[in-house]
Amino acid sequence: MINTIINKELDLEFPIFQGGMAWVADAYLAAGVSNAGGLGLIAAMNSNGEQLRAEIKKCKELTDKPFGVNIMLMSPFADEVAQVVVEEGVKVVTTGAGTPTKYMPMWTEAGIKVIPVVASVALARMVEKRGAFAVIAEGGESGGHVGDLTTMALVPQVVDAVNIPVIAAGGIADGRQIAAAFMLGAKGVQVGTRFLVCNECTIAQEYKDKILKAKDIDTVVTGKRLGHPVRAIKNSFTKEYQECEYDRSKCDDETLESMGTGKLRMAAREGDVKNGTVLAGQVSAMVKKEQPAREMIEEMFQEAEQTLRGAMQWVK
């Protein structure tokens, strides 16, 4: 069985995190993944402090296993939720969409293990100096907000640059990819897209079906013009958005920004996968069926172990 500092230090059965996906990663999904042996994460997204507190309390009712919170640092309520995770005794905080250095002294003093998502070596080095327990190196294959570097290029560079554990993310949906992440030097993985179709995920069935029907070239990145590129599955909305994005005569930046407002909730919670944003990674086509989270994790790690053992036959 694969054991690393990640599952040992965080008291997990498997060194795997569930991605903190907005409008997806609620208390039910987080508790489901934690009960299955991984680290479930609640997405704070744009929740205010009391909304997040309610979700944390709900998660505590659903599991006695460790779970964490993902904090989107661009949120207008970032200060509130940063305090709430301390007050509620959350053990792990992951961060995205910004630099968490403002809050890290408070979190580390409270005993929280801070694990920022990074898309560059420079950010990984910065948060290491400020006391991060680990970093999540996320490649551009992932769904949602993406960086430029791929997982294959980013992970080994971050591993070489820091002395803290690195968790690989982006383009990971089966055991072969988990094995590859460990070969690159990672000590754990974060999975998003595959967990979208686990039984414990409460998003609309239409969203799950869109993932299950996806082909290899069905995702697209939009938002580069605004400096916030996002990967999603192609649909009527992404087509309309791209037409505006690449033709400034059709709309200015403010109009383009407003086009995306509320679109993820529309898809994830209302099931409108034609006019909403269906965030998903490039591995969507590899996701073949709905499963319980426990079965999903066990299947991935069994395949990872087999892959790693098989690779040794080529070493003389």
Image (cartoon, rainbow, N blue to C red):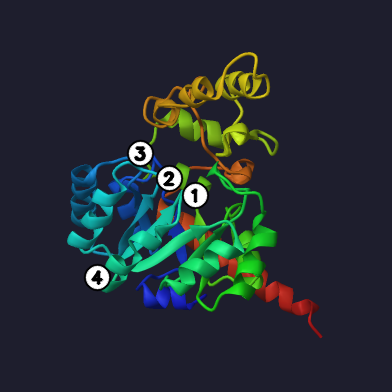
- 135 and 73: which one is in front? 73
- Is residue 36 visible to the viewer in this orientation of the structure? no
**Badge 4 amino acid:** Ala
**Pointers 4 and 2 in contact (C-beta within 8 Å):** no
Q: Nearer the viewer, mark 1 or mark 4?
A: 4
Mark 4 residue element: loop
Considering only order in the chain, which callout, 3 or 1, is on the residue closer to the N terminus? 1
Q: Which mark, by number, is residue 202?
A: 3
Task: Name the residue type under label 1.
Answer: Gly
The correct choice, above or below, for 153 with respect to 283 in the image is below
Q: Quadrant of the C terminus?
A: bottom right
Residue 110, disc: 4
* Viewer-proximal residue among 276 and 45: 45
Residue 192 circle label: 1
Q: What separation in Å lies between label 1 and label 4 (alpha carbons)?
A: 28 Å
Given the image, on which type of amino acid does mark 3 rest?
Thr
Which residue is depicted at the point 22% across and 62% down? Answer: 86
Residue under the image location 54 percent in, 31 percent down: 210
Mark 1 residue element:
loop
Along the line of sight, the residue nearer the viewer: 29 or 114: 114
Numbered label attached to residue 315: none
Compare marks 2 and 3 and give the one earlier in the sequence: 2
Q: Which residue is mark 2?
A: 21
- Label 2: state its secondary structure: loop
Of tags 1 and 3, the one toward the viewer is 1
Tag 1: Cα neighbours inside 10 Å, few (<14), some, or many (≥20)? Answer: many
